[in-house]
Structure formats: structure tokens, C-alpha cells
Amino acid sequence: MEKKLRVGFVGTGGMGSNHVRIHSENPLSQIVAMCDLIPERCENAKKRFNLDPNIPVYTDFREMIDKEQLDAVDISTSNEFHSIVACYAFEHGLHVFCEKPDAINVSEAMRMKEASEKAGKVLMCMRNNRYYSNSQYLKKFIEAGKAGEIYCGRCGWIRRRGIPGRGGWFTTKARSGGGPLIDLGVHMIDLSIWLMGNPTPVAVSGCTYSKFHDTTAQQGHAREIDAREVGTFDVEDLAMGMIRFDNGACLQIEFSWASNIEKEQRFVELRGTKAGFAWHDDGTVGIFGEDENGVLFDMAPKCGQMGDGHARAIDHFLHIVLEGAKPDYVPQQGVNMIKILNAIYKSAETGKEVLL
């Protein structure tokens, strides 16, 4: 019989429900227990995905970890609990898969990394954008040397209106770590740096703005799962900045929940000495360069359907733990990510470049 990973879930609302679905469809995973401060979310997930109704439900993750025979936990809580749950799991000899962002500050990200190393267990955080078909195509294109040296680029995820959970944990900095920079920025910054070959960030500069905390206009991404009629909104709604790397490359960034733009878009544009390229959120790519005869060319290769990046990321985690697959993600990348985000917030406060 094929070995399965015995998984307990901490947080089953919103993205956590999606994690439950993915594990329920993966033959390498066995759902053993669920935990949520609102137990109805667990019961709803069991019904929605036709799971065993007798799967135990907890409101305290420590009790679940202490009582159940788990191999791993899957964490989809609000951001401030990521490191708390992860470190407790590592202390009890479990592997950890965690939703992004890795943590809300650098010290918590380091705690997670060090706890995983001490326990000798796998820590993987969600990096779903790496696993889309167009991302995989570009990674192979770059690794084949067809782009040459990638020396600069830009990336972003900008929304016209789409503030999640207004007044709840999303817009409370002590709980979320920040606004769209930490919510959306992890996705596109990680994809860009991964395609660039994971250079080490050495300095950042940035600006943040909060101009739309009173807006009533919303669009598709305005998740109201944790919204409050009266609540906190002490995070930015727009962040822009620049990241410099140890190899001399740079990356411009822009992330917004609300700004007066034409339409929402996600994008990555990187420039190499042999070719530049654009990653589009519809699953396509564009490649731009100059041939040996000095003639400019544009390419639009077929990449196929984007696929389910979340499912592929979780599947990779399962193969790492059960089969010893080489990890695409290592915890130091998570630490570097939080260093970048925290330093951009600091730069925005001080008006100065921050060295990492």
C-alpha cells in the first residue's frame, strides 16, 4: 500500500478550505484532524469535500497536535500565528506546510527556519506561482541560457479595488504584518527572484500609501471573510519600491489593493542580455530579443493551461517528505522574503534605502 502523510489542518476557512480540498484529492495525503477557532468551518469543509464526518475537530492546535498521531500540519491561519503553530509542530516532530507569508517579521521567520533544522523536518511555504505552466516554461528557458544574464526587471500585482477583510486581521498590521505588499507581494516577488536564479537581496527602497481606507467601492478580490463594520485599518493600500541584489541585478515592485488604474493585473517582466520576457496572468508569455543578424524578434510560445499552482506546490511538499524529492523552496528563501518586505516598510518610514 502506498504510504500516505497523516496531516492535521490549522485554519480551514478561506485558503485553508482550499488546502483541505487539495489534500483530499491527493493520494499521498490522509486527512486526520482539523482545527479552527470557528469549528463550523471544519464541519463545512468535511461536507463540502465529502470527507469522513468522524474526522476530529479542535479549536486548539496544541491539543490537536498533542492528541493526534500526525506526520505534518498544514497551516492557513491569520499571519501572526504562522510561526507559533509551525514551531510547536516542529517541537513535536512534525513536518510543516504553511500558507504565505512565511511570517510577519524576520525574527519569526528565523525561528521557523531554525526550529525546522533542529527537528530535522521539512518546512515549506506556499509558492504557488512557481508551479504554473508558464512559470515552468520560463524557468527552463532561462536555465538553458536562452535569456543570458538577467540583470533587471519589474513585477507587481495591482488592483483597482480589492481590499480584503476590511477592519479584520488583513488590515491590522499587528496581525497581518502589512497590506498588499505582504499579502500580494510575496507571490510576484518570489516568482521574479526564483526566475532570476535566487540572487541574495542586499538593499531595498520603497514608498507606501494608504489613501483608500474609507472607500466603499470593491471588486472581485474584496474578501469579506474576516471583515468588521468597525475595525482597524493601519496598513498600506499601495506599495512601490526597488530591490537590489548581490549580483548587481535590480527589481522594481508595485502592489496595491486599491488605486485608480485601468484594471487589475499581475505581471513579471525580466530583461536578459539575450532575451527579455513577460509573464502574464492569463498563462501566456512573451519573449523579446535580437537574433544573430541584428533583427528584433518577438515570440509567444505555447505553455498550455496554467494548472493549479496551489495543488502542485502541496504535491511537491508531499513528495519531499515521503520520497525525498529535492526541495524547490528552502527556508532561507522565506527569511530573505520577509527581510525584503520588512525593509521596504522601514524604508517607507525613514525615506532612506535600507541595507539588508
Image: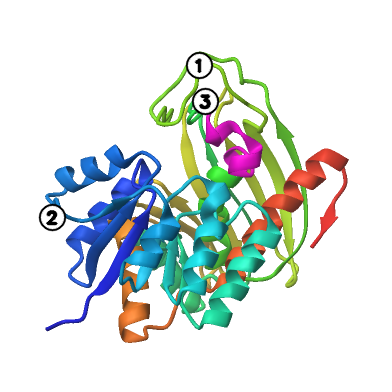
**Relative horizontal placement of residue 22, taking residue 96 as reference (left or right):** left
What crowding class fits label 2: few (fewer than 14 Cα within 10 Å), some (14-19), or many (20 or more)? few
Q: Position of residue 155 (x, y in %)?
A: 57, 49
Q: Nearer the viewer, residue 57 or 159?
A: 57
Secondary-structure class at tag 1:
loop
**Relative horizontal placement of residue 172, taking residue 125 as reference (left or right):** right
Region rendered in magenta: 168-181
Secondary-structure class at tag 3:
loop
Location of the N terminus by quadrant is bottom left
Query: Which mark identifies residue 166?
Result: 3
Residue identifier under label 1: 229
Q: Nearer the viewer, residue 333 or 115?
A: 115
Q: Nearer the viewer, mark 1 or mark 2?
A: 2
Residue at left 67%, top 50%? 252
Query: Which mark identifies residue 301?
Result: none
Look at the picture and state if 325 lies above or below 300. Answer: below
Q: Is residue 262 visible?
A: yes
- What kind of residue is marked 2? Asp
The rendered magenta stretch, by its main secondary structure, is classed as helix
- What kind of residue is marked 3? Arg
Q: Tell me the distance, in whole angstroms, between the alpha carbons under discs 3 and 1.
A: 8 Å
Residue identifier under label 2: 52
